Amino acid sequence: MKKIIFATGNEGKLKEIKVILDMEGVEILSMQEAGIHADIEENGTTFQENAIIKAKTIGELTGEIVLADDSGLEIDYLNKEPGVYSARYAGEDTPYSIKNQMLLDRLEGVEMEQRTARFVCVIAAALPDGRVITTRGTIEGYIGHAPAGENGFGYDPIFYVPEYRCSTAQLTMEQKNRLSHRGKALRAMKEELKVYLEAEV
Ligand code: ITT
């Protein structure tokens, strides 16, 4: 069984990742499952930089194949805020019910056409041979007028997908994974990993 460590402390991400990356002969371990405790300073200014920082830090620590996800919400009307600061927006420990309401308040009175937004996800893989691979996925949508839905995590209750006319928190995990930034980036990464793992044997 091949081991891949996913360098995330975010339980919401991890649930989606384990379903999407499911591969025969490969075991995906969270940092907790791998017994790793590391506080990684995400001091990059782009999703790509931060994903690479996370994957490389844990890769150098373990010598295993390590994946990391850096993602966030870009709201066009707010100059793409909260962007790479999505997890830290209004404080890392502030509940998402409050963060979501703060963003809704900042969009008070803003018309639908100007509420466009996207989730972005960059997945980085740090390989034991020193190489780094990255893949990227996005999903376009808009910020609704009120939070809705209980599924997902983070900003899902305020992110609406036009095709479904509901928030990503109202989709099942399977539906969200099919459309989402993370689903797209992870499926692209899965293809890259298959090539790497086959060449390695
Ligand atoms: P790790 O760094 O440990 O992976 P994190 O939560 O700190 O976890 P990020 O720095 O990548 O991760 O921040 C991403 C934030 O963007 C996340 O905390 C959510 O607030 C938001 N986000 C990303 N993907 C999302 C999704 O699918 N649904 C809702 N919110 C999402």
Image (tube, rainbow, N blue to C red):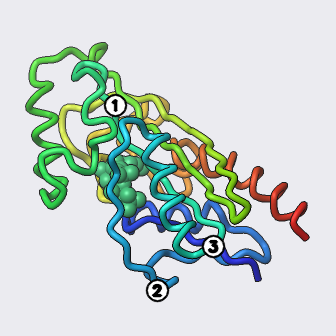
Q: Is residue 170 visible?
A: no
Quadrant assignment, res 25: bottom right
**Earlier residue among tags 1 and 3:** 3
- Residue on which disc 3 sits: 63
Amino acid type at circle 1 is Glu
Question: Which percent across, then down, holds residue 82?
Answer: 25, 36
Q: Quick check: 48 above or below 39?
A: above
**Earlier residue among tags 1 and 2:** 2
Q: Are marks 3 and 2 in contact (CB under 8 Å)?
A: no
Q: CA distance from mark 3 to mark 2?
A: 14 Å
- Residue on which disc 1 sits: 74
Q: Are marks 1 and 3 in contact (CB under 8 Å)?
A: no
Within 10 Å of the Cα at label 3, are there few (<14), some (14-19), or many (20+) other Cα atoms? some
Question: Which percent across, then down, holds residue 68?
Answer: 51, 57
Mark 3 within 8 Å of ligand 1, using the beta carbon: no
Quadrant assignment, res 86: top left
Report the residue at 65% width, 62% height from top. 21
Report the residue at 43% width, 81% height from top. 32
Q: Quick check: 21 above or below 106?
A: below
Question: Which percent across, then down, holds residue 87?
Answer: 27, 50
In the foreground, 2 or 41: 41
Amino acid type at circle 3 is Gly
Can you tell which of label 1 and label 2 is closer to the viewer? 2
* Badge 2 element: loop
Counting labels gives 3
* Badge 3 element: loop
In the foreground, 161 or 36: 36
